[in-house]
Image (cartoon, helix red, strand yellow):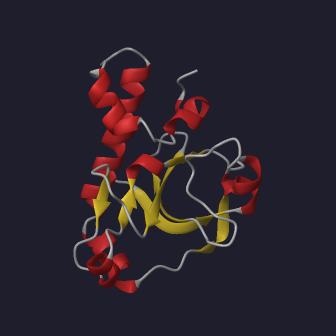
Amino acid sequence: MEYVYDIYLLSSDFINNYPLSDYPELMYKQSRPYNCLLIDTHDDYFICIPFRTSINHKNAYHFKNSKRSRKSKSGLDYSKIVIIKESSYISSSKAIIDHDEYIETMQNINRITLEALNYVDKYILHIKGLSILHDKEFNRLYRFSTLKYFHKELGIN
């Protein structure tokens, strides 16, 4: 299957509708843009994977060849995926990321997309009771995940 993807910022509409006080696992800060790889899966939502400077777990794509990755564990964090249905949640401005991280992202886009889809699908199947993970496995994968905020968008209700 072919996917459409690009790099964007989350809009102020999203930030206003998902305040950190109510959604503490979201990783944005008012003074810092929320740069993310936006994937159109041709479902009725977009998957937004944030770029992060430091990721200390395995639920991510870790950059290997960027300047920043040599100093910290930068990458795309699957545990902080945001599910977007509203186009107003996507900023009209494209995000600006490090050139070497952009290149590595595009070189590995198929892998990143498949890993992100697998992460989301595994969560949906567990929550729907169709493929139950062991408690330890579920906690390892999803304890700090943002997916719990997007059940409506994922059709889990």
Question: Residue 142: image x %, image y %?
Answer: 40, 36
Q: Is residue 108 left or right of residue 87?
A: left
Question: Residue 86: image x %, image y %?
Answer: 67, 48
Where's the C terminus, which quadrant?
Answer: top right
Q: Residue at x 72, y 49 (%)?
A: 19
Q: Is residue 121 above or below residue 61?
A: above
Q: Nearer the viewer, residue 66 or 110?
A: 66
Q: Residue at x 27, y 51 (%)?
A: 58
Residue 1 makes an appearance in the image: no
Q: Is residue 84 above or below residue 151?
A: below
Residue 92, by quadrant, is: bottom right
Question: Residue 17: image x %, image y %?
Answer: 75, 48
Residue 21 makes an appearance in the image: yes
Q: Is residue 78 left or right of residue 13?
A: left
Q: Is residue 34 above or below residue 70?
A: above
Residue 72, by quadrant, is: bottom left
Question: Residue 114: image x %, image y %?
Answer: 28, 49
Q: Nearer the viewer, residue 72 or 16?
A: 72
Q: Residue at x 35, y 77 (%)?
A: 101
Q: Is residue 105 above or below residue 48?
A: below
